[in-house]
Image: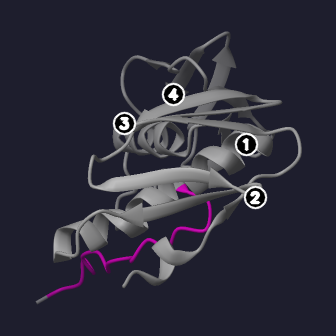
């Protein structure tokens, strides 16, 4: 039995959930999200809650049970509250700026890197070179943050690069430069 899958997803005020077979649509004040679900799952709306039930009892179906419930929960939270992810830039001369849907990164390369933000994701750069990504789709925000981080991942010697806020980068000791 899935402990997560058994929990119903409460539908807050202002959020509308429509289930049509293996397709779910969640609408709220911030927007709407749609997703096709696994055919092994039965999803229904009962008493202001979304309930997931498996159709089979094998191990893989039980894994999909918890996954399906988590995906629906993220959709409901996304359209009602939204999600955000913060990235920080470390390094002398490293900076970022946003104009429209293009994030420009100056992170030590000979030319600035222009990163196109996907539709539905907005980016804001703070004073301390903190990039804040906001949107309603948790999957898309995580994927976008990972792609931005991959432009210049933090290196282990000086710690320069783009990292998630609060991420610990294990530091290595460099060469000592002493005599033999």
- Callout 4: SS: strand
The Cα–Cα distance between marks 4 and 3, rounded to whole angstroms, is: 10 Å
Is 116 within the magenta?
A: no
Q: Quadrant of residue 137?
A: top right
Identify residue for label 1: 82
The first of marks 1 and 3 along the sequence is 1
Q: Does the rendering let one see residue 99?
A: yes
| Residue at 63% from the left image edge and 49% from the top image edge | 85
Main SS class of the magenta portion in the image: loop
Going from N to C along the chain, the mark reached first, 3 or 2, is 2
The label nearer to you, 4 versus 3, is 3
Classify the position of the N terminus by image quarter. Answer: bottom left
Front position among marks 3 and 2: 2
Task: Identify whether 172 is placed above or below 52.
Answer: below
Please identify, in this view, whether the residue under mark 1 or under mark 4 is nearer the observer.
1
Q: Which residue occupies the foreground of this view, 48 or 135?
A: 48
Residue at numbered disc 2: 47
Task: Kindly report which numbered mark, 2 or 1, lies closer to the viewer in this rendering.
Answer: 2
Q: Label 1 to label 3, Cα distance in Å?
A: 25 Å
Q: Are marks 1 and 3 in contact (CB under 8 Å)?
A: no
Task: Find residue 33 and report its horizontal and vertical position in percent.
Answer: 58, 30
């Amino acid at each position: 039995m899935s402990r997560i899958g058994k929990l119903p997803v409460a539908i807050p005020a202002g959020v509308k959930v429509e289930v049509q077979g293996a397709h779910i649509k969640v609408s709220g004040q911030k927007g709407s999200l749609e997703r096709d679900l696994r055919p092994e799952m039965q999803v229904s709306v009962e008493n202001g809650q979304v309930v997931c039930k498996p159709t089979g009892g094998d191990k893989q179906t039980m894994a999909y049970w918890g996954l399906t419930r988590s995906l629906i929960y993220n959709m409901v939270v996304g359209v009602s509250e939204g999600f955000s992810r913060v990235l920080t830039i470390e390094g002398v001369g490293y900076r970022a700026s946003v104009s429209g849907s293009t994030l420009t990164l100056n992170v030590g390369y000979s030319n600035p890197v222009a990163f196109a933000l996907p539709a539905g994701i907005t980016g804001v750069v703070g004073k301390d070179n903190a990039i804040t990504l906001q949107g309603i789709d948790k999957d898309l925000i995580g994927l976008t943050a990972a792609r931005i981080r991959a432009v210049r991942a933090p290196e282990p010697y000086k710690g320069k690069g783009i990292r998630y806020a609060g991420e610990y980068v294990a530091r290595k000791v460099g060469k000592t430069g002493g005599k033999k």
